[in-house]
Amino acid sequence: MDYSRMEMLKKIQMLSLVLLDTNLFLDTHPMDTAALNFYDKYRALLEKTRDEYTSMYGPLTPASVNTSDGWTWIDKPWPWEMEA
């Protein structure tokens, strides 16, 4: 797996954890506007990073497959597969 692909996956994991943690905070502080703004900012960043990853390396999950191109989920190594 090339360095940039691995770095993008790490970034996606990090952003996902940030959102999960912020989600838990918002469950108990739903009116905290700073937390809501923080969540929105990092959600947009995660979406952008996922879109970039998908355009460069293919879908991260079966749900992100563009079926107009066929079932491309099986065309490339899956995100968790390390290349030899």
Image: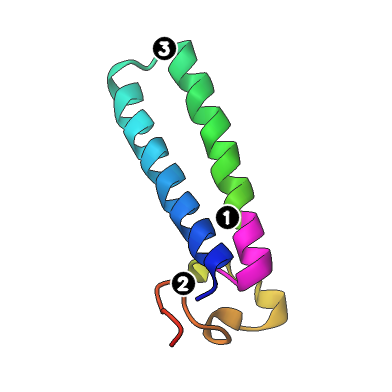
Q: Secondary structure at mark 3?
A: loop
Question: Where's residue 51, x and y in %?
Answer: 64, 56
Closer to us: 5 or 79:
5
Looking at the rendering, the stretch of residues picked out in magenta corresponds to 51-59
Residue annotated with mark 1: 50
Question: Where's residue 38, x and y in %?
Answer: 50, 24
Residue type pointed to by label 1: Arg
Residue drawn at x 27%, y 19% as measured from the top left: 28
Residue drawn at x 52%, y 35% as measured from the top left: 42
**Can you say whether 5 is above or below 24 in the image?**
below
Question: Where's residue 69, x and y in %?
Answer: 71, 80
Q: Secondary structure at mark 1?
A: helix
Closer to us: 40 or 80:
80
Which disc is residue 32 wearing? Answer: 3
- Distance between the alpha carbons at the discs numbered 1 and 2: 12 Å
Residue annotated with mark 2: 79
Residue type pointed to by label 2: Pro
**Can you say whether 67 is above or below 23 in the image?**
below
Mark 3 Cα-neighbour bin, 10 Å: few <14, some 14–19, many ≥20 = few
- Residue 20: within the magenta? no
- Distance between the alpha carbons at the discs numbered 2 and 3: 35 Å
* Mark in the foreground, 2 or 3: 2
**Quarter that holds the C terminus:** bottom left
Q: How is the image coloured?
A: rainbow
Please indicate whether residue 84 sits to the left or right of residue 75 in the image. left
Q: Are marks 1 and 3 in contact (CB under 8 Å)?
A: no
Q: Secondary structure at mark 2?
A: loop
